[in-house]
Amino acid sequence: MENQKSIAVLNTLIILNNDRIEGYETAIKETNEEDLRVLFARFVQTSQKCKQELVLEVINLGGKVAEGTMTSGKFYRVWMEIKASLTNQDRKAILNSCEYGEDIAVATYERTLKNDTEHLHGEQLLMIKAQYASIKANHDKVKTMRDNMMPTL
């Protein structure tokens, strides 16, 4: 197994978690709804924990840790949609946008687990599977909250 490929896979997930951290920190500042602020803070903590584990693994492999976020692409646009929804204080729109962002996060982890396992050793794979479970739980929470909202007439 080549370390550079492992590092690249791990760095992709670091950037994804950086995006989630930045996006939800922005959302916390923009919403006035306390339950959403608490939820978003929990999601920030999830990604901070994931990122910390990934960073340690990249360092252990002798790699350079990816910094920053994606400044283009789907994930960035999602956070702009969330910010716009927050500005209008439309709870359902906020949750819709968050779910879409969480769909991207879940899909990224699923792609990694489907396509990149040959670049990961056993402990890395277990770590990523555990992170996937946490990210998926966040996604499912947002989806449930959105789905349980009363329809507006």
Image (cartoon, grey):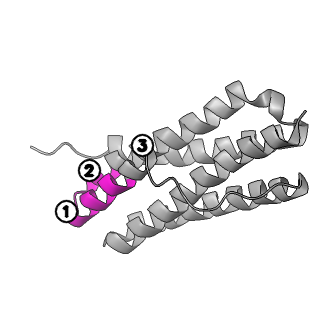
Q: Of label 1 and label 3, which has the lower sequence position?
A: 3
Q: Quadrant of residue 86?
A: bottom left
Q: Would residue 114 be counted in the magenta stretch?
A: no
Residue 88 got which mark?
1
Instruction: Please determine whether, in this image, residue 36 is positioned above or below residue 142.
Output: below
Q: Which residue lies under the disc numbered 3?
A: 74
Q: Which residue lies under the disc numbered 2?
A: 93
Q: Of label 1 and label 2, which has the lower sequence position?
A: 1
Q: Residue at x 82, y 33 (%)?
A: 119
Q: Nearer the viewer, residue 94 or 114?
A: 114
Quick check: can you spot residue 83? yes
> Disc 1 on helix, strand or loop?
helix
> Disc 3 on helix, strand or loop?
helix
Look at label 1 and name its amino acid: Asn
Q: Are marks 1 and 3 in contact (CB under 8 Å)?
A: no
Q: Of label 3 and label 2, which has the lower sequence position?
A: 3
Q: Which marked residue is nearer to the observer: mark 1 or mark 3? A: 3
Q: Nearer the viewer, residue 62 or 120?
A: 62
Q: Residue furthest left?
A: 153
Q: Residue at x 61, y 64 (%)?
A: 45
Instruction: Please determine whether, in this image, residue 129 is positioned above or below residue 65.
Output: above
Q: Nearer the viewer, residue 73 or 17?
A: 73
Q: Position of residue 57 (x, y in %)?
A: 83, 53
Q: Which marked residue is nearer to the observer: mark 3 or mark 2? A: 3
Q: Which residues are magenta?
A: 79-95
Q: Is residue 105 left or right of residue 97?
A: right
Q: Residue at x 54, y 57 (%)?
A: 69
How would you rate the neighbour count of disc 3 (Cα within 10 Å): few for under 14, some for 14-19, many for 20 or more? few
- CA separation in Å, label 1 and label 2: 9 Å
